[in-house]
Image (spheres, rainbow, N blue to C red):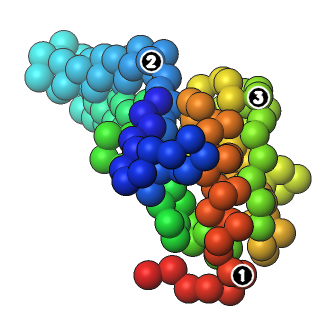
Amino acid sequence: MRDHRHGENAPHTHPEVWTGRATNRVQWLLALIGAACMALGIELAVDSAWTSGIAPLVMAVVGCIAAGLLVLFGTLAFVHVALRVDEDNLEVRCGHIGLPRRRIPLSHVAGATYISHVTPRQWGGWGYRWLPEKGTAVVVRRGEGVVLELRDGHTFTITVDDAEAAVQVIKARLGRTKPGARAH
């Protein structure tokens, strides 16, 4: 977790920009499994001793490489999540490339709640999730999180370290944001 303070450091002021993140190191193991699948596919393509024809070999190579790429990029995209709250917006970025990314104007947020225990099991796994009865979430690990109540009636949950501080900053910003105001 990082909490960068810019500007005044008075006891009850909030930073101009609050940033936090959550990381899941277990997903590096899954990324290695994906890389191993890709390596197997490449090894089969380069040094094949298949005698039963070209079609089974092509299917095995393509299958291993495709599965490896899906697992590798799917896990690397959700190794960590970064949350950034500034004066007008809340931005969620996933993985090393920052995708998927979601920017929510604070004028679209009705409220924020701290939740002490979010698990991948509650959301059907890691990643960017949507469940009709629960809303949308970015879950990279189990632990604390922020639940945003959006003005359109939807919710958005993010796992992030020091979620209580994030909720305090968001609520402070909401006190200054007028509904319907446009973000720059």
Distance from label 2 to label 1 (Cα)?
A: 39 Å
Q: Which residue is mark 2?
A: 25
Residue nearest the observer in this picture, 142 or 50: 142
Among numbered discs 3 and 2, the one appearing first in the sequence: 2
Q: Secondary structure at mark 1?
A: loop
Distance from label 1 to label 3 (Cα)?
A: 28 Å
* Neighbour tally class for label 3: few under 14, some 14-19, many 20 plus, Cα within 10 Å: few
Residue nearest the observer in this picture, 132 or 139: 139
State the image coordinates of residue 165 (x, y, percent, origin top left). Answer: 62, 39
Q: Is residue 123 left or right of residue 87?
A: right
Residue at the (56%, 85%) spot, across then down: 182
Q: Is residue 123 left or right of residue 84?
A: right
Q: Secondary structure at mark 2?
A: loop
Q: Which residue is mark 1?
A: 179
* Residue 101 figure quarter: bottom left
Disc nearest the viewer among 1 and 3: 1
Distance from label 3 to label 2 (Cα)?
A: 20 Å
State the image coordinates of residue 169 (x, y, percent, origin top left). Answer: 61, 51
User: Identity of the amino acid at label 2?
Assistant: Arg
Going by the picture, which residue comes out furthest to the front? 10
Disc nearest the viewer among 3 and 2: 3
Is residue 32 shown above or below 70? above
User: Identity of the amino acid at label 3?
Assistant: Ser
* Neighbour tally class for label 2: few under 14, some 14-19, many 20 plus, Cα within 10 Å: few
Q: Which residue is mark 3?
A: 116
Q: Is residue 38 left or right of residue 157?
A: left
